[in-house]
Image: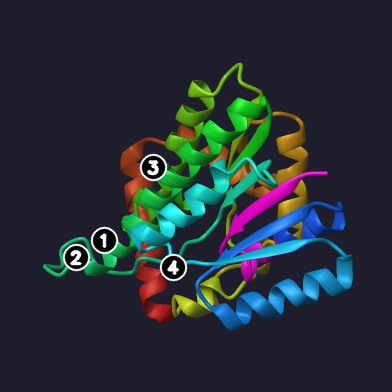
Amino acid sequence: MHRALITGGTAGIGAAFARAFAGRGASLVLVARDPSRLDESAAQLRREYGVEVETIVADLSDREAQQRVADRLVAATNPVDVLVNNAGFSVKASLLEEDISAHDLGFEVMIRAVLKLGGAAGRGMSERGRGWIINVGSVSALVTQNNYSAIKAWVGNYSESLGVQLAGTGVQVTALMPGWVRTEFHNRAGIKGSSIPGVLWLDADRLVEECLRDVARGKPVSIPSLRWKGIAGVLRTTPRGIVARLSARLSHRRSREK
């Protein structure tokens, strides 16, 4: 049986990964910053699936917390076989703002923590000759809306680069690039999403199942659903000037929804 460590494992896509692994009989290590929600999620998973659930209270914007999680990933006792780097949030601040504290927070949680934990997992797993690292990115990496798009573009490139460095070790790296997913993520970001066609929304549990099938096939990038595969394919082949104009239109529409 495997043991999966999931950051942001109490809500949204992270919670869906927790359910998916628990349903397969895997032990879990859930990482989140809210102790009460973490305990509640762990208790529910133990009750419903009968699996072992370990918890780590950690705010990944704090570097000491990042180190604690990294230490768990390299631990030889009850080793972690799967890392899901999922913790994240929307970065709405303008790139022109003098105060870049919101950007700093995004960098810590969605870049530095991903780098720190991915490296720790890669070292620990490669010593054992097997492991899986899933980094949650976004199709928004293919557009040019804001710093969230830029951060997720980094996540995608980093994942493929890490996969190259781990080639031949038995450790596989997959970047998950979802489109719009029905979770509390958008509510937290203050995005209503009323102008987004219903057909473009994804269910978190189905998304995770598709991702795990792609992981089983050894794919370095997972884009769940045919519709989002098609959208991503178009964005990758469209001239960047056109993508920039499309991104500006999307940003304007999103600002009207707030």
Residue located beneath label 2 in the image: 100
Q: Is residue 11 magenta?
A: yes
Q: Where is residue 9? Give x, y as percent.
A: 62, 64
Mark 4 residue crowding within 10 angstroms, few (<14) / some (14–19) / many (20+): some
Q: Are marks 3 and 2 in contact (CB under 8 Å)?
A: no
* Residue type beneath disc 4: Asp
Alpha carbon of mark 3 to alpha carbon of mark 2: how far? 18 Å
Answer with mark 1 or mark 4, whichever residue precedes in sequence: 4
Relative to 215, is 178 above or below?
Answer: below
Q: Which mark is residue 252?
A: none
* Residue type beneath disc 3: Trp
* Residue type beneath disc 2: Ile
Relative to 102, is 245 above or below?
Answer: above
Q: Residue at position x 47%, y 62% from top?
A: 88
Alpha carbon of mark 2 to alpha carbon of mark 4: how far? 19 Å
Q: Are marks 1 and 2 in contact (CB under 8 Å)?
A: yes
Give the extent of the magenta segment.
1-16
What element does badge 4 sit on? Answer: loop
* Residue type beneath disc 1: Asp
What element does badge 3 sit on? Answer: helix
Q: Which mark is residue 59?
A: 4
Residue located beneath label 1 in the image: 104
Q: Quadrant for the N terminus, please.
A: top right
Answer with mark 2 or mark 4, whichever residue precedes in sequence: 4
Q: Residue at position x 37%, y 59% from top?
A: 64
Q: Where is residue 37? Give x, y as percent.
A: 62, 80
Query: Of circles 1 and 3, which is in front?
Result: 1
Residue located beneath label 3 in the image: 154
